[in-house]
């Protein structure tokens, strides 16, 4: 954002430009520094901004001139309609959790934790060291850095019971974020036009990846304890599906964590049908009252394809994740990744590995657990006080979100608009259903910025639900 001095220079130059003929030479930077008493850097910022607005143009070695105004004509891209034809899969608009917000808004809509919850010191130091290392100048293997693959494998191996064969680094493929991993997995294991079972509700990115892979999505109802194994078995048998996507730990959006016995029953259903469970462990580092229990640790026959992301817990700038798969499934996924992006930046991989192998990483995670608990409890209490119409089916034992059911007559689109007009961004729950929603829900991020404003945000939601106008200010 421009500062006051930059804005002052831009206002003066705009007024000058309106009086100047096209092609007139703009005063030199030195003259503008003297005229406005500003620094050369401030003048350069103003000139760049005016250039970006199309008001002036720079001719290297000659000077800067008022840009000639050309007669605007409507651009015709109609030919592209015939060239592109209908898309194979509809691509939705930008999802609500990815929307940016104004600095003064209360953001309860996002999918990422606040910067205050990230290991900033570890990340900055890791990037400094990674920039000095060989990974800044060399191409890594398509499967990823050997040391990082070994770390992912070891982490899952530590949860593997005695008697089962733990994964090895060879089973790991490093990804540029778990979203790209979902796309590769669905393309490699499901295929175009084939059935894919998804929990409902479920992660909106999985729904998008399935659509882009051309899979035929089959919803499986899921609640606070996860999907019913009998319902899952029926869906497998009726559709002939061979892949089920689920989130056993702190599911997005519901926050549900499958009970241990239910997870084992679901794994048995998958095994009995010679199928795959795609386990998305995106929230592995966000336990509050429990810890993540990866089902992949209970399987050594290749039925579980395990996704583990570091993007949310390390930094959104570190788009690094991994898929752990065994047998031909791993080879197919690796081939797809090679065709899609060739490899993941070695510098990002080195930085991620540096962070998670520092002694301070475990210290950070212990502190994070307490911070998330305080934020979650504050938002729960705020909803109870100001939005009594909202019903939480459960208080999540981990993750980043609350999933609230609203009265049946709620118009979610209108509610979202009303809240945004009053400075609060929320995420309507429709985006998390692969088919028709089972009711009006909203997803609220308790890990977002400014937790001290959670009560104010809840007050706005409650007022919008009740149809009341904001209270007058003095």
Image (cartoon, grey):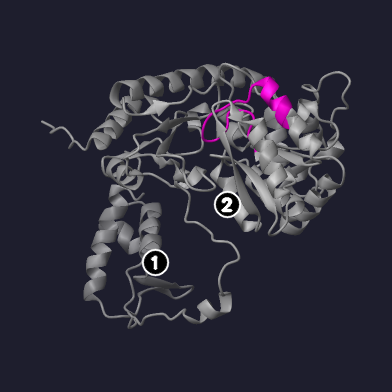
- In the figure, is residue 335 to the left or right of 465? right
Disc 2 crowd, CA 10 A, few/some/many (<14, 14-19, 20+): many
Which residue is at a point 80% across and 31% down the rendered structure image? 153
Q: Which residue is mark 2?
A: 208
Which residue is at a point 40% across and 64% down the rendered structure image? 52
Q: Residue furthest left?
A: 474
- In the figure, is residue 91 to the left or right of 102? right
Height in image: 436 above or below 82?
above
- In the figure, is residue 244 to the left or right of 78? right
Which of the marked residues, 1 or 2, is nearer the chain's N terminus?
Answer: 1
Q: Secondary structure at mark 2?
A: helix
Given residues 50 and 171, the one toward you in this image is 171
Q: Main secondary structure of the magenta part?
A: loop
User: What's the magenta region?
Assistant: 246-266
- In the figure, is residue 335 to the left or right of 315? right
Q: Which residue is mark 1?
A: 51
Disc 1 crowd, CA 10 A, few/some/many (<14, 14-19, 20+): some
């Amino acid at each position: 954002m421009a500062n006051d001095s930059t804005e002052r220079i831009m206002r003066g130059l705009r007024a000058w430009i309106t009086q100047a003929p096209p092609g007139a030479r703009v005063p030199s930077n030195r003259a503008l520094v003297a005229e406005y008493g500003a620094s050369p850097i401030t003048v350069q910022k103003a000139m760049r901004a005016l250039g970006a607005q199309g008001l002036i143009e720079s001719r290297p070695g000659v000077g800067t001139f008022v840009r000639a105004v050309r007669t605007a004509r409507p651009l015709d891209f109609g030919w592209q309609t015939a060239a592109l034809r209908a898309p194979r899969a509809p691509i939705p608009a930008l999802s609500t959790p990815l929307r940016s917000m104004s600095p003064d808004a209360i953001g309860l809509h996002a999918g990422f934790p606040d910067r205050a919850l990230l290991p900033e010191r570890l990340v900055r130091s890791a990037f400094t060291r990674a920039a000095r290392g060989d990974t800044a100048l060399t191409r890594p293997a398509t499967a990823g850095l050997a040391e990082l693959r070994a770390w992912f494998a070891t982490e899952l191996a530590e949860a593997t019971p005695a008697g089962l064969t733990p994964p090895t680094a060879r089973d790991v493929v490093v990804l540029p974020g778990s979203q790209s991993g979902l796309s590769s997995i669905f393309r490699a294991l499901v295929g175009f036009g084939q059935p894919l079972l998804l929990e409902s509700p479920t992660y909106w990115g999985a729904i998008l990846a399935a659509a882009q892979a051309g899979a035929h999505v089959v919803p499986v109802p899921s609640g606070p304890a996860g999907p019913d194994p009998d319902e899952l078995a029926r869906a497998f048998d009726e559709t002939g599906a061979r892949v089920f996507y689920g989130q056993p730990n702190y599911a997005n959006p519901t926050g549900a964590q499958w009970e241990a016995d239910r997870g084992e029953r679901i794994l048995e259903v998958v095994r009995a049908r010679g199928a795959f469970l795609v386990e998305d462990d995106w929230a592995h580092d966000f336990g509050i009252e429990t810890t993540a229990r990866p089902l992949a640790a209970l399987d050594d026959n290749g039925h579980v394809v395990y996704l583990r992301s570091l993007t949310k817990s390390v930094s959104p700038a570190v788009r690094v994740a991994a898929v752990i798969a065994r047998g031909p499934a791993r080879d197919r996924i690796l081939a797809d990744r090679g065709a899609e992006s060739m490899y993941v930046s070695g510098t990002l991989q080195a930085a991620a590995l540096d962070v998670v192998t520092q002694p301070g990483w475990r210290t950070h995670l212990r502190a994070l657990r307490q911070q998330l608990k305080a934020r979650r409890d504050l938002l729960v209490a705020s909803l109870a006080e100001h939005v009594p119409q909202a019903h939480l089916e459960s208080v999540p034992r981990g993750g980043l979100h609350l999933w609230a059911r609203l009265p049946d007559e709620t118009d979610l689109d209108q509610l979202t608009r009303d809240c945004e007009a009053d400075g609060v961004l929320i995420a309507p729950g429709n985006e998390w259903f692969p088919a028709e929603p089972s009711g009006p829900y909203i997803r609220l991020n308790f890990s977002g910025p400014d937790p001290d404003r959670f009560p104010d945000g809840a007050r706005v939601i409650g007022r919008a639900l009740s149809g009341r106008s904001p209270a007058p200010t003095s």
